[in-house]
Amino acid sequence: MTAPQQDSSSGATLKDKRVLVTGSDGFIGSHLVERLVADGAQVSAFCLYNSNGSLGWLDESPSFQQALKDGQAEVVLGDIRDPEHVMASVEGMDVVLHLAALIAIPFSYVAPRSYVETNVIGTLNVLEAVRRHGTPRLVNTSTSEVYGTPKEVPITETHELRGQSPYSATKISADKMCESYALSFETPVTILRPFNTYGPRQSTRAVIPTVLSQMLVGAEEIRLGAVSPKRDFTFATDTADGFVRAALTDVPPGEVIQLGTGRTDSIGEIVEICKQVTGSSARIVTDEERIRPAGSEVEILLSEPRKAKELLGWEPTVSLEDGLAQVAEWLRPRVDADKAARYHR
Ligand SMILES: NC(=O)c1ccc[n+]([C@@H]2O[C@H](COP(=O)([O-])OP(=O)(O)OC[C@H]3O[C@@H](n4cnc5c(N)ncnc54)[C@H](O)[C@@H]3O)[C@@H](O)[C@H]2O)c1
């Protein structure tokens, strides 16, 4: 493993740095923007243009709204698939944190081309802009889904990649575009590879908000897909901390760094903790519509977190039990009884 030239634990911060965050309007992106605002960065929040002017989760963020008023943040509405607009948005930035993507695996079965256009072409647009403008640092967001069902666990960064879903294939392609720019042009890109992230604001496409929402509306039966798959869950603010550290740490171009806890729980085990958190006694009912094709379901994800600790000084701080309790508290006043059991791809 190559030693970093500048360690984020050295006290360096992103204060006054111009930081563009794509996917700012999303779940992880909004937590990251709030962290950057708190750190004093000058934030450009790239949000997907839409007809009703929504900034996604940033509409509900008091700290971001204050930063807008104070001139510490700006909104860039656009589409990551648009090369000229991405080129213009990256100009003058010190750091680009690229999170924009289509991320739902089930929807990638029905609309794979949109994933190629957003996740692969979108990343190419960001790479080209960073290369042309000489941006000092790009962090590209990978995912543990690039491994497919692993040959061995815990998974290290050198594990082979396997496109077990169209989503996974597009994220592998995006990672490989980054690798190619690192090797061909020395583009200073770090490939950050979060394992499953959870927290307030996550969509009910994901298993944790699905389980908790159904429990919080008092359902006696929890409708789920497979309960045997195991996942390594990181709380959103810990994931955001990983991005900040990656932005501050000068690793060789193309370095891949995982963000995971080194703990794995089956979906069935997650349901049991959620029962304790909510006081629910619901039982699981299999919803056939939610079962993934046999060859596509990833059975286990478990991170070896050593590299993130050694290179970035990163370690998760929120336990699964505390994190699930925080998500339940956030969901409690927001959960919609009519939507809780609805399958959202
Ligand atoms: N949630 C997880 O467990 C997890 C785990 C590993 C990696 N990731 C990665 O983290 C990143 C953020 O995921 P998330 O969980 O916050 O999902 P999310 O769906 O909440 O966020 C994705 C964001 O991308 C934006 N986006 C989509 N298409 C766009 C386009 N054409 N132009 C501009 N913006 C567009 C969306 O508006 C949204 O804000 C993604 O790159 C995802 O692959 C997520």
Image (spheres, grey):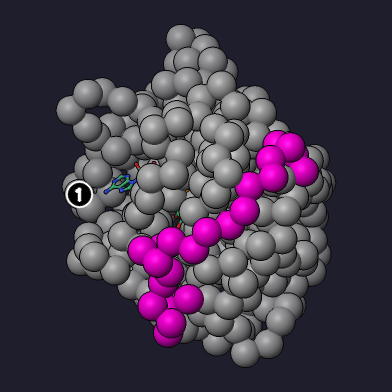
**Is 283 one of the magenta-colored residues?**
yes
Q: Is residue 251 above or below residue 139?
A: below
**Residue in view at x 50 percent, y 29 percent:** 335
165 is higher (above) or lower (below) than 113: below
Q: Residue at x 72, y 53 (%)?
A: 272
Q: Position of residue 160 (x, y in %)?
A: 55, 87
Q: Is residue 80 magenta?
A: no
Q: Decide if residue 295 is on the left or right side of residue 121.
A: right
Q: Is residue 120 visible?
A: no
Q: Which quadrant of the rendered structure holds the N terminus?
A: bottom right
Q: Which residues are magenta?
A: 276-297
- Residue pictured at 23% horizontal, 52% vertical: 81
Q: Position of residue 287 (x, y in %)?
A: 43, 61
- Pinpoint residue 198: horizontal percent, then vertical percent: 60, 47
Q: Relative to 19, is 245 above or below?
A: below
Q: Is residue 342 visible?
A: yes
Q: Which residue is mark 1?
A: 82
Extreme residue in the front direction = 220
Exactly how many numbered labels are in the figure? 1
- Between residues 311 and 146, which one lies in front from this camera angle? 146
In the foreground, 337 or 344: 337
Residue in the picture at 40% in, 67% down? 288
